[in-house]
Image (spheres, helix red, strand yellow):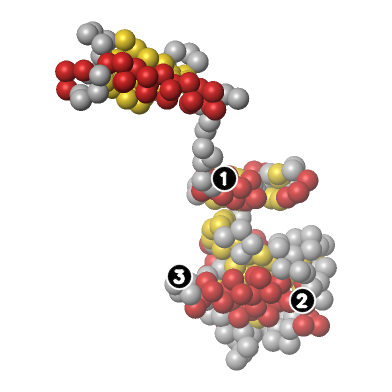
């Protein structure tokens, strides 16, 4: 079996094992160390989010597997048996920013290989194989979603929307584009706008001078009773009540539809 020390590059991806050090004891530590190497405008935002997740009300386990965006390939950081593995993009100069990368204890890594990796792959190991084998769930840092990588390459799909070209992940048990799903969740949480429904006031005549003022839409659907007058239980005369009703209807309808 080949034990790989430092960076291992394969096409657009790069793989390595992280030594535990005072700077990199947890998955969150490694993420905080790697994120600034991207040099992106939201680097500080993601680091602050990690700090809030760990130290805020959620008190998230700092060894929760983390996923964040990098140049042309996402970065996955996870821990198995006290060893932190990274699968990432090779388009960033990680080694210029991070000095805690190391091959780790060979025996420990061999124990992980022997326990989790299929025999056919033990001579050429990459962290992706562990991700697939253990069906690891990652916290997608930019989107605040828990996602799983689709293990079978034949079932992988990509979202074609140009503003978030992305692989599909398993989210809440279904294959989804994480960006589309985030937008769907955000749209559900938005307050619903007040729906304006055109209506008008009308008088509905009753018996012996009684009447009701009702609010109707233009399909003649009675939506609400605005006022109800019955001369038998009112101090107002029928004439005064009708004058008030006429004024109310005229004023409402005139201002409502002008």
Q: Which of 76 and 125 is in front in this view?
A: 76
Can residue 90 be seen in the rendering of this structure?
yes
Q: How far apart are marks 1 and 2 (CA)?
A: 33 Å
Q: Earlier in the sequence, mark 2 or mark 3?
A: 2
Disc 2: CA contacts within 10 A as few (<14), some (14-19) or many (>=20): some
Can residue 105 be seen in the rendering of this structure?
no
Residue that mark 1 sits on: 187
Q: Nearer the viewer, residue 150 or 106?
A: 150
Of the two numbered discs 2 and 3 in the rendering, the one whose residue sits closer to the viewer: 3
Q: Which of marks 1 and 2 is nearer the N terminus?
A: 2
Of the two numbered discs 1 and 2 in the rendering, the one whose residue sits closer to the viewer: 1
x and y percent of residue 67 in the render? 63, 64
Q: Which mark is residue 58?
A: 3
Residue at the spot x=52%, y=33% of the render? 195
SS of the residue under disc 3: loop
Residue at the spot x=60%, y=25% of the render? 258
Residue that protrudes farthest toward the top in the picture:
207
- Compared to residue 94, the image places residue 211 above or below, namely above
- Compared to residue 119, the image places residue 37 above or below, namely below
x and y percent of residue 217 in the render? 47, 19
User: Quick check: 7 left or right of 30?
Assistant: right
SS of the residue under disc 2: helix
Of the two numbered discs 1 and 3 in the rendering, the one whose residue sits closer to the viewer: 1
User: Quick check: 219 left or right of 2?
Assistant: left
Residue that mark 2 sits on: 37
């Amino acid at each position: 079996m080949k034990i790989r020390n430092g960076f291992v590059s394969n096409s657009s991806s790069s793989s390595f094992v992280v030594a535990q050090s005072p700077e990199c004891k947890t998955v969150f530590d490694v993420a905080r160390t790697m994120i600034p190497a991207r040099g992106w405008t939201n680097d500080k935002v993601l680091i602050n989010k990690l700090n809030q997740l760990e130290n805020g009300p959620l008190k998230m386990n700092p060894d929760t597997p983390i996923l964040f965006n990098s140049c042309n390939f996402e970065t996955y950081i996870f821990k198995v048996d006290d060893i932190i593995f990274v699968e990432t993009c090779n388009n960033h100069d990680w080694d210029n920013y991070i000095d805690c990368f190391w091959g780790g204890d060979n025996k420990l890594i061999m124990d992980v290989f022997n326990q989790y990796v299929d025999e056919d792959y033990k001579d050429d190991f990459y962290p992706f194989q562990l991700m697939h084998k253990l069906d690891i769930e990652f916290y997608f840092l930019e989107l605040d979603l828990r996602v799983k990588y689709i293990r079978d390459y034949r079932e992988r799909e990509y979202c074609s929307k140009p503003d978030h070209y992305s692989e599909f992940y398993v989210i809440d048990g279904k294959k989804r584009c994480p960006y589309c799903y985030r937008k769907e969740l955000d749209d559900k949480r938005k307050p619903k706008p007040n729906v304006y429904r055109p209506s008008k006031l009308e008088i509905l005549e009753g018996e012996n001078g009684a009447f009701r003022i009702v609010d109707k839409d233009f399909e003649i659907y009675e939506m609400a009773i605005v006022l109800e007058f019955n001369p038998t239980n009112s101090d107002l005369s029928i004439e005064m009540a009708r004058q008030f009703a006429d004024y109310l209807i005229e004023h409402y309808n005139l201002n409502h539809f002008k």
